[in-house]
């Protein structure tokens, strides 16, 4: 039983949750099996780690039924029943906080009963509550609001049509409005996930049904018409839909910065409309849309750093549970170190403990390596890199790139050539990543190698060509590369 999903879930319970779960099991409404309760009370003795050998099935059986021979089938059923109660408890905890769903379920339950006066009073009260919560950003996701309002107006319309004496106004128009707005928001969010999947795993975007659906709507001006309709007939909902639409445009049109800046402005102007959870999703969409540019951006790190500061300003860097995503952490370090070393150092020190425990040590050592490199402590940076142990693909890329930079700065040609060959082999062996990212990383390796050659054998013409290529093409760490070109230009002069 030590490896069972039941104990795996129970290990995540706080002391308060274990107490509430016991109350849940004791309730005859949820559990009428006394032996299931007894099993939990025995298991509970080993909280919070639940790792004692006494938790073996045979040992537990001996405590529950000391005078009976071990029965595998009965014990298996008891564990299964307790596991199902655990699932029901967690579902109930979520449901208890979902005011929208609880209101709708209650309205559904009384809509078919002969309590018309109560129904109309309750549904109008629920409508007022939904609207109030919308304006005070109480919902975790606005799509939940639109789904809830759609279902509420659907219920209300059906009731009014069946009970003409209560009919005060036609509500039919509101249900489809919320249906369309909620559907589009979900599509725009899904499209962001499609782009992320393409960037990370080189999956085709244009064959995805979300892309095809939204492209058809866009090409035939349907999205524009819906936005115009919403602006005129539902002005409270218009800025919400416009913000998500601008994210879609920024993600789908990546050969210019026009739509990125439009999305950035929309998000900045309307950030107060969204809950922290949804604002975090939109913020991530902003980061993705900027990183997905096909064009070169000379001020990439400055612009990216500006987006990071937006995240800190809105207090959405951390996830709802207080942790910070390892990928977000390394991105912040990589970008901010080129703009503000003091900010980077404070960020590492203040947020390293917010990383998930299994990633904390490696991410910290990598971050210190980046920081020391920027400070010019190249040997110390190498030392920190040697302590990083990560299976993450992109972390491996980052480490290998940093090694190339360090060996260039140390003018260690032998170590550089070895690392260069290792990087080229690594890139060639990797299949699950976006092709444009591969090209960008290959270019970066070639640029550093060319810098090494030109430092050893100066050639003003080749240096000028290299400078133009770095300036015109999309590449990693463009600011650092151009700085190294400038240093060589001074030597040649």
Image (cartoon, rainbow, N blue to C red):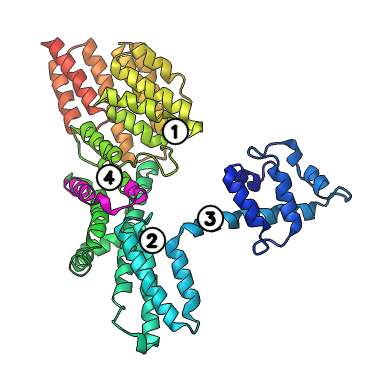
- Dot placed on the residue nearer the N-terminal end, 4 or 1: 4
* Mark closer to the chain start, 4 or 3: 3
Question: Which label is found at residue 355?
Answer: 1
Q: Is residue 262 magenta?
A: yes
Rendered view: 490 above or below 86: above
- Looking at marks 3 and 2 on the same chain, the residue that comes earlier in the sequence is marked by 3
N-terminal label among 2 and 1: 2
Drawn side of residue 335 relative to residue 118, left or right: left
Instruction: Name the foreground residue: 421 vs 216.
Output: 216
Q: Which residues are magenta?
A: 258-281
Instruction: Please identify the residue farthest to the left as the structure is shown.
Output: 493
Question: How far from the left and from the top, in percent, is residue 150?
Answer: 36, 70
Q: Residues within 10 Å of mark 2 (few under 14, many from 20)?
A: some
311 left or right of 90 in image: left
Which residue position is annotated with label 3?
Answer: 93
Task: Assess disc 4: are there few (<14), some (14-19) or many (≥20) residues with their C-alpha within 10 Å of its C-alpha.
Answer: many
- Residue 372 as seen in the image, left or right of residue 98: left
Q: Is residue 287 magenta?
A: no
Question: Which residue in the rendered view is the most extreme toward the bottom?
Answer: 165
Q: Secondary structure at mark 4?
A: helix
From the viewer's perspective, is the residue at label 4 or at label 3 nearer?
A: 3
């Amino acid at each position: 039983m030590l490896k069972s999903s039941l104990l795996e879930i129970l290990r995540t319970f706080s002391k308060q949750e274990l107490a509430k779960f016991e109350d849940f099991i004791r309730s005859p409404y949820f559990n009428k099996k006394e032996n299931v309760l007894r099993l939990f009370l025995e298991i509970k003795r080993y909280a919070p780690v639940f790792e004692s050998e006494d938790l073996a099935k045979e040992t537990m059986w001996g405590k529950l039924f000391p005078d009976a021979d071990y029965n595998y089938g009965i014990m298996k059923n008891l564990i299964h029943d307790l596991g199902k109660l655990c699932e029901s408890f967690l579902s109930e905890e979520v449901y208890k906080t979902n005011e929208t769903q609880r209101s709708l379920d209650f309205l559904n339950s009384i809509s078919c009963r002969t309590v018309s006066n109560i129904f109309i009073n309750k549904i109008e009260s629920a409508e007022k509550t939904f609207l109030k919560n919308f304006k005070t950003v109480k919902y975790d996701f606005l799509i939940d609001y639109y789904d809830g309002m759609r279902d509420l107006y659907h219920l209300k319309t059906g009731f009014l049509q069946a009970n003409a004496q209560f009919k005060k106004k036609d509500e039919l128009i509101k249900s489809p409005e919320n249906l369309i707005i909620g559907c589009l928001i979900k599509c725009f969010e899904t499209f962001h996930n499609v782009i992320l999947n393409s960037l990370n795993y080189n999956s085709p975007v244009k064959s995805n049904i979300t892309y095809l659906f939204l492209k058809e709507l866009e090409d035939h001006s349907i999205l524009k018409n819906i936005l115009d309709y919403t602006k005129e007939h539902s002005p409270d909902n218009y800025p919400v839909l416009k913000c998500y639409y601008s994210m879609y445009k920024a993600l789908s049109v990546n050969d210019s910065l026009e739509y990125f800046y439009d999305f950035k402005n929309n998000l900045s102007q309307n950030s107060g409309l969204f809950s922290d959870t949804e604002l975090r999703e939109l913020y991530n969409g902003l980061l993705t849309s900027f990183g997905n540019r096909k064009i070169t951006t000379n001020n990439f790190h400055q612009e990216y750093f500006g987006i990071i500061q937006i995240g800190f300003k809105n207090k959405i860097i951390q996830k709802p549970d207080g942790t910070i995503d390892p990928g977000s952490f390394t991105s912040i370090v990589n970008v901010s170190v080129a703009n503000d070393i003091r900010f980077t150092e404070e960020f590492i020190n203040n947020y390293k403990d917010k990383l998930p425990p299994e990633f904390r040590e490696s991410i910290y050592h990598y971050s210190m390596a980046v920081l020391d490199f920027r400070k010019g402590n190249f040997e110390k940076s190498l030392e920190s890199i040697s302590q990083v142990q990560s299976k993450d693909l992109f972390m491996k890329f980052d480490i290998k790139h940093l090694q190339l930079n360090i060996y260039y700065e140390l003018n260690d040609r032998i170590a550089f050539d070895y690392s260069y060959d290792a990087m080229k082999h690594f890139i060639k062996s990797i299949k699950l990543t976006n092709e444009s990212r591969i090209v960008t990383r290959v270019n970066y390796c070639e640029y550093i190698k060319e810098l090494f050659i030109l430092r050893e054998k100066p050639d003003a013409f080749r240096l000028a060509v290299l400078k133009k290529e770095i300036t015109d093409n999309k590449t990693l760490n463009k600011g650092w590369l151009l700085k190294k070109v400038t240093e060589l230009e001074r030597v040649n002069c």
